Image: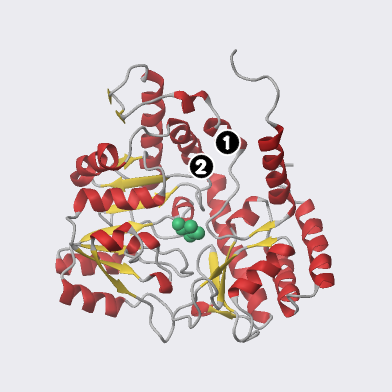
Amino acid sequence: MPWPTEQDTEVFEIIEREETRQNTGLQLIASENFTSPAVMAATGSVLTNKYSEGYPGKRYYGGNEYVDESEDLARRRVCELFGATHANVQPHSGANANLGVYLALLQPGDTVLGLSLDHGGHLTHGSPVNVSGRFYNFISYGLTASDERMDLEQLRDLAVRQKPKMIVAGATAYSRTIDPQPIREICDEVDALFMFDAAHIAGLIAGGAHPNPVGVADIVTFTTHKTLRGPRGGCILSTEEHAAAIDKAIFPGLQGGPLEHVIAAKAVAFKEASHPSFSDYAAQVVSNARALADSLGGHGFRLVSGGTDNHLMLIDLRPFNSELTGKEAQVALDRAGITLNKNTIPDDPRSPFVTSGLRIGTPSVTTQGMKEQEMARIGDLIARVLADPTDDAILGEARRDVAELCGGFEPYA
Ligand code: DSN
């Protein structure tokens, strides 16, 4: 073989160090998870070598008989998992899935309603720095000031006044159930398309821990690597009515050759998510989030909206320490082996680079097998670090306690 026989130690040592970081620290980023060895094996397979522009049975290059089988399997499995009639499993990411839907069903300049970024929405829901906000006339709806839940009254008022072509639901930093039914009713009233971005909660939906928007929304997009626990990538489910337009928008409209190794890994993840044990996993993710939220609330942190129904919580740091920013908290916790992200809270007076909040999620620690009692320990650790975020001795001691806690739950032992 023409390739070098000596191992590329430079790269593989970096990967080894990352594996150690994942094994020995607490991964609390709400959009991350640990994939199974089978998902990683498919991602690292010979399918990475194949070009297969087009769709099963209609490819531009030869040699796609096995790729066709694999992509068909992925499409079939995801349709069964969510009760959908059509799936496009080719989006390289959630952002591409969303953009593909816009390209398929909107014209530049069309009006769309989406949850504002600083109330928990996503960049691709109309942020002015994203292509969605530059090509389409996105108008933001938000949360109520009183209980920090989705403001359906405001959404309806905006919809009646603005007559949008589409309403986008879904969030990246919202800890409450999003019931698709009232949004469907608003869409019907103003004759708008309904797209539900289920990126964060796809695994909860698959496991029965969140209402399923499939069959209610016209289009459901999601990423496969968050609560769903698959490889990094995106997926679009739609009714037959929109299938051809969406397929055409993803290829040739937006992407070239699909990542067939990732699509095979998506198929593996869809099967894993259809296993009865995945429902237990989804329920435990939610119970763990509640337990962690209770623990943090007990330590004097304010939970945005007062708690959580899903896999994440948003913490307002100000009642705990009005001077402490999300940025400082993230850095101190990272030094203690607790990985999470700073996050704006609704109407945050600080910039998105500084923030007054933290977003914390339980998908990864739940995959590791941690339960409510470990969540209480994690809450104590976070509070201990943030009580004195610049004290090296406290950070060092917390780092040792984190490693000891993780020692019993290594994802890749
Ligand atoms: N980066 C993702 C998240 O953390 O929620 C959204 O794309």
Secondary structure under the numbered disc 1 in the rendered image: helix
> What numbered label is drawn on residue 40?
1
Q: Dividing the image into 4 quarters, which one contains the C terminus?
A: top right
Left or right, residue 24 beside residue 108: right
Residue 131 x/y as whole percent: 31, 57
Secondary structure under the numbered disc 2 in the rendered image: loop
Q: In the displayed structure, would residue 291 be above or below residue 362?
A: below
Residue 363 x/y as whole percent: 58, 56
Name the residue at 66% across, 67% down: 331
* Foreground residue among 353 and 292: 353
* Foreground residue among 58 and 257: 257
- Amino acid type at image mark 1: Met
Question: Which residue lies most toward the top here?
Answer: 1
Task: Choose the circle earlier in sequence order: 1 or 2.
Answer: 1
Q: Dividing the image into 4 quarters, which one contains the N terminus?
A: top right
Left or right, residue 51 beside residue 48: left
- Dot 2 crowding, Cα within 10 Å, few <14, some 14–19, many 20+: many
Q: In the displayed structure, would residue 259 be above or below residue 182?
A: above
Mark 2, residue position: 231
Q: Real-space Cα distance between discs 1 and 2?
A: 7 Å
Instruction: Say if mark 1 contacts mark 2, CB within 8 Å.
Output: yes
Name the residue at 32% across, 41% down: 87
